[in-house]
Amino acid sequence: MKGPADTTPEQFIEDFFDSLTAQTVQGDPPQSVMDRHFTPDVEQISDGIHLDHDRLLAHLRPVSRNVTSWRVDVHEAVADGHRIAARLTIHAWRRKGGETATEVHLFAEFTDDGRMRRSHQLTRALPPMPPAGTTDTAA
């Protein structure tokens, strides 16, 4: 994986989440996915909930079973060295239950080789987008 200094902040964040999701959904061993994307001492605070290595690892298992496809839209991102702040939307389509869309405000620190060391995230669920070619009149 490219490190944060090897590309734009927007592209780095898109590549990070796309790679993480792809390898998880494709059935790569969860520990292997963790090793490639997170440092052993990773700390993530997501909506006030502290997730360490073991809790992040546990989170990968349902993703691998439930997600069929996804898209990552990075709306904006800025970097200061290895620290990146970004606003993005993660769209996921599940085997049962259709689409979910989650807006993410991310403040994170990465290593030279592109692994996440720590992050703070604020998220919110978005309503599903109407199917292509239709107009959503409920406003």
Image (cartoon, grey):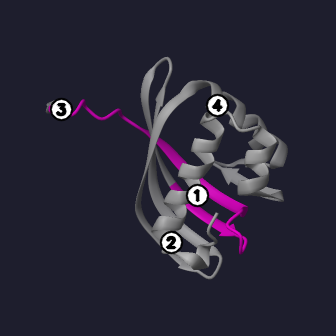
Q: Residue beneath label 2, please?
A: 9
**Residue 64: numbered disc:** 4
First in sequence, mark 2 or 1: give its number. Answer: 2
Q: CA distance from mark 1 to mark 4?
A: 17 Å
**Residue 136: numbered disc:** 3
What is the three-letter code of the residue carrying label 4?
Answer: Ser
For image coordinates 24% across by 30% down, the residue present is: 131
What is the three-letter code of the residue carrying label 1?
Answer: Phe
For image coordinates 50% across by 20% down, the residue present is: 95
Question: Local crowd at mark 4 within 10 Å, few (<14), some, or many (≥20)?
Answer: some
First in sequence, mark 4 or 2: give its number. Answer: 2
Q: Residue beneath label 1, please?
A: 16
Q: CA distance from mark 4 to mark 2?
A: 26 Å
What is the three-letter code of the residue carrying label 3?
Answer: Asp
Evaluate if marks 2 and 1 touch, with contact meaning CB atoms under 8 Å apart. no
Residue 17 rendering spot, x and y as whole percentages: 56, 52
Relative horizontal placement of residue 114, taking residue 8 as reference (left or right): right
Can the viewer see residue 85 in this picture? yes
For mark 1, give the secondary structure: helix
Relative horizontal placement of residue 16, taking residue 31 as reference (left or right): left
Q: Quadrant of residue 108?
A: bottom right
Which mark is nearer the camera, 2 or 3?
A: 2
